[in-house]
Image (cartoon, helix red, strand yellow):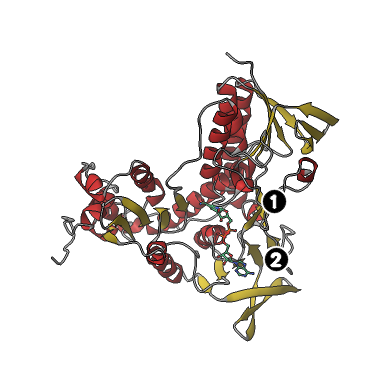
Amino acid sequence: MSSPRKVIVIGAGPAGYVCAIRLAQLGQEVTVVEKAEVGGTCLNVGCIPSKAMIAAGSLKERIGEASKMGIEVGKASMNVGQLVEWKQGIVGKLTGGVAGLLKNHKCTLLRGDASLVDKNTVLVDGPDGKVTAKADDIVIATGSVPIEIPGFDFDESQVWSSTGALSPERIPDHIVVIGGGYIGLELGFMYSKLGSKVTVLEATSGALPGQDRDCVKIIERSLKKRKIKLMTETFALGYEKKGKKLVVKVKKGDKQETVECDQILSTVGRRPYSGGLGLEKVGLKTDERGFIKVDDQMRTSVPNIYAVGDIAGQPMLAHKGSKEGLVAAGVIAGKPERYDVRCVPAVIFTSPEMASVGETEEQLKERGASYNSGKFPFAASGRAMSLMETEGFVKVLADAETDELLGVHMVGPEVTELIAEAALAIEMGATAEDIGRTIHAHPTLPEAMMEAAEAVHGVAVHIFQKP
Ligand code: NAI
């Protein structure tokens, strides 16, 4: 067996820590450098705490609907301190778990800011001073940070980034959300359920740009139903504090108007983060958007330096970063690994939830692909009815010639879970017929996937399709 390689992983988010653990499993000698908490944005101030708080908002909302099932309860009220403490408890368990895993795998964890000295040396400026560490290979997994727009500097008091929004001291009366993308809508729905009035300002012509428009229509209808105001083609210009109110100045076309609120949340995207890393010391450049260019083995232009996760390009999703981390670890350990995926699923925790994998109809039309589509509404699903969540549908897009699945888009109950089957199907090169012929347990939500696949050929049993 060859001697272990010394590897330094910079950043302990879902790309970096997954890479480090896999490197250790493959017998390498690993040091992880992290300036904040292990777990990165995802575990500390992103995916996990947001999903916890969204679940709390949804439960509060469900309590309000319980009387329909004959359960009489009083009006639910909020203890915000307890909510934040509960959420923080989950974060603590998970970050503690990751730290434990790194330790059990004998990965050395160095606390501090890392910067590159040369292609084999990293300087770590930590609480106990500066140390240098040597490595055969370096993996950059520094992630991304929220984009700030002029006039809305994050003070995490009047203007929240997603971080501030996940540790509130109170539930705002009226929150203005700048940006109707992933974060803006997830947190917009959440605050609406927790009791806030919500206004979303979105620069483009609709919510969730780039997502399947049929699915987005259901989300936009749900926004309306909940009285969440979505102002499209609208830019926020700045704000003023007037007494206890914040007055946001917005521009829609040629017109300017103001929106009064008591909280602003700015979620206009994230940018890759490589500040202070000293990329220039090793001759590494970022592209015009700040990403480090990598090949399909996650190698940068410097052969022993790898980049994984948000810093290595779109989509900025935790699971894509983790996959890249696994690939880089395998490559460093001498395995024939490649980032060779057919699809990356995306999940959005709105109400109803939305999830998609593969190409959208808009993308298929743009590339002139010939495809068939099948759709099954949750309104026809017995399981969805028993859950009292019948909004939405599953849409399957299959190649007209080969019947291979090209894309699956879903909006409705638990679709963030259901999308896993679609991702597996696309990765395995399954056809719509394969999905339709597979027995799906009854009564379950995944039956909607089977029926949508059958609908591709006009033979879904539980909806009427004109011959
Ligand atoms: P985003 O790119 O999803 O949405 C930003 C939105 O802001 C866009 O709709 C854009 O048109 C709009 N916008 C940009 N500038 C604006 C302006 N000046 N005024 C009004 N609107 C403006 O970015 P977001 O929501 O900040 O999320 C960042 C990333 O984090 C996502 O791209 C996603 O990769 C990741 N994420 C993933 C989640 C998940 O997997 N469930 C949840 C939350 C975030």
Q: Amino acid at mark 1?
A: Thr
Q: Residue at x 56, y 39 (%)?
A: 90
Please tell me which residue lies in front, 383 or 426. 426
Image position of 204 with respect to 215: above or below: below
Which residue is labeled 1 in the image?
286
Please tell me which residue lies in front, 283 or 233. 283
**Looking at the image, in which quadrant does ligand 1 appear?**
bottom right
Query: Residue 105: x and y, percent?
Result: 60, 21
Q: What secondary structure is marked by label 2?
A: loop
Categorize mark 2 by other alpha carbons within 10 Å: few (<14), some (14-19), many (20+): some
Which residue is labeled 2 in the image?
149
Q: Is residue 334 left or right of residue 69?
A: right
Q: What is the total number of numbered labels drawn onto the structure image?
A: 2
Image position of 269 with respect to 107: above or below: below
Q: Amino acid at mark 2?
A: Ile
- The Cα–Cα distance between marks 2 and 1, rounded to whole angstroms, is 21 Å
Mark 2 or 1 closer to N-term? 2
Image position of 48 with respect to 134: above or below: below
The residue mark sitting in front, 2 or 1, is 1
User: Splitting the image into 4 quarters, where does residue 283 fall?
Assistant: top right
Query: Residue 262: x and y, percent?
Result: 66, 68
Please tell me which residue lies in front, 86 or 224. 224
Ligand 1 closer than 8 Å to the CB at disc 2? yes
Categorize mark 1 by other alpha carbons within 10 Å: few (<14), some (14-19), many (20+): some
Q: Residue furthest left?
A: 467
Q: Is residue 46 left or right of residue 68?
A: right
Q: Quadrant of the N terminus?
A: top right
Please tell me which residue lies in front, 56 or 311. 311
Q: What secondary structure is marked by label 1?
A: loop
Q: Residue furthest bottom?
A: 254
Q: Residue at x 17, y 64 (%)?
A: 465
